[in-house]
Amino acid sequence: VFFNFVIFETVTILIYLHLLDIKWLIYNRDFARVLTSYVRDCKDLLKAHISLSAIVSHVCEAAQFRRVHKPCSVSVTVPSAETSAADSEKPKKATFTDANFPLDPEGRVYHLGVKRGEVTNRILSVGDSDRARRLAGLLDPPVEGGDLFHAESSRGFNVYTGRKLGVPITIISTGMGIPMMDFVVRETRAIVEGQMAFMRLGTCGLIDATSPVGTVSVAAKGSVFVRREPDAFSDADVEPYRISLPIPCDETLSAIAVAELKEQMGDLSNVITGLNASADSFYSSQARQGAAFDDRNGGLMDELLGRYPGLTTLEMETFHLYDLARVSHGSVIASAAAIGLAQRKSNDFIDASRIAELEERAGEALLRTLVKCELENDDDGGCTDSSIRVW
């Protein structure tokens, strides 16, 4: 009787929702929460006293929520006995050794989860995992019907390795910010032989008022770093933000990138060069302002442009890539390009429908840039042991 009651009430609710033409609520987390609470309360019918009208009232509140928020998909999977058994048979996490530079018994690095032979000496770094997946489709088809190498680490890094025009290349979704770039450069450097080339394809805010959204900028004049200074918020004599000196890129790699971008982008986008600024935050250190926090950044943009009038872009990764290349004893060369999604002067933001094509054309250009760049000891893609190479 209890279960018949619950089923009857639930079906009645769903029919009522259908009549209200708000079926999307079935997939909305608020409705799922309301319905779950209702069924839980029905375990004690004598005390619950929950009526259909009360449930519909809660649902209508969720409908009001829907007007200002996107519906969120909720996927609920009830594990079967077979899947539970399979999960119990999954290998446990590896035990890492060497706290200074952790490696597992197979030689896999700690954050990227890859090992020697799975990463090449030419790397295209992108921030977004979907972008990495789409750009991996620009690599050569795998030979003999095989699969393109793909590894996703527990930390969210996606690594794709294959060939472009016959040259071994790796694409990595780096994520955002300096620590993520640090993981990628240092950990790939540890498992690749010989000199390496890094190209970054990111997104950015455009500072140059003459550059419209969709402009692709190559940081050919280097990058500076903008850092929020925590001591300033306890010591009035300390400035709240510090701006570094510029760090140069690899000029040859940048020149190839500019030429390839101009060819691939065509009339789709302007291609410019300039000085980049990387910040340690998307908000405070990039002079975005709001009342919720005491960021003291009202004059930061003017200070940046006053010190570096040639500044064209603002993002969060390029400076650290250039910095690591600078201190790599010559074993890493690097350049970076970014697509301007936001115009910071006009406060304009790009139409989302344009982004995929911009990324794919720019990605094709930078993959070709990596193909054309010359590296030392470059006969094997960065791994002399052909038996473990995935390309």
Image (cartoon, grey):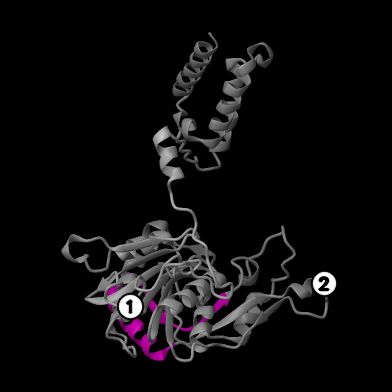
In the picture, residue 196 is in which quadrant? bottom left
- Going 69% across and 71% down the picture, which residue do you hit? 297
Whether 339 is among the magenta residues is: no
* Mark 1 crowd level (few <14, some 14–19, many ≥20, 10 Å Cα): many
Q: Which mark is residue 30?
A: none
368 vs 59: above or below:
below
Q: Which residue is mark 1?
A: 261
Q: Which residue is mark 2?
A: 234
Q: Secondary structure at mark 1?
A: helix
56 vs 120: above or below:
above
Instruction: From the top left corner, tell me how far across and down residue 276 is, in percent.
Output: 51, 80
Instruction: From the top left corner, tell me how far across and down residue 321 is, in percent.
Output: 49, 79
- Going 56% across and 71% down the picture, which residue do you hit? 179
148 vs 224: above or below:
above
140 sits left or right of 93 in the view: left
93 vs 223: above or below:
above
300 sits left or right of 213 in the view: right
- Going 65% across and 68% down the picture, which residue do you hit? 284
Question: Distance between the Cα atoms at labels 1 and 2?
Answer: 46 Å
Instruction: From the top left corner, tell me how far across and down residue 334 is, in percent.
Output: 43, 83
In the picture, residue 361 is in which quadrant? bottom left
Q: Amino acid at mark 1?
A: Leu
Q: Amino acid at mark 2?
A: Ser
Q: Secondary structure at mark 2?
A: loop
Q: How many numbered circles does the render carry?
A: 2
* Mark 2 crowd level (few <14, some 14–19, many ≥20, 10 Å Cα): few
Does residue 266 appear in the picture of this structure?
Answer: no
Stretch of the chain drawn in magenta: 250-278
The residue lying furthest to the left in this view is 144
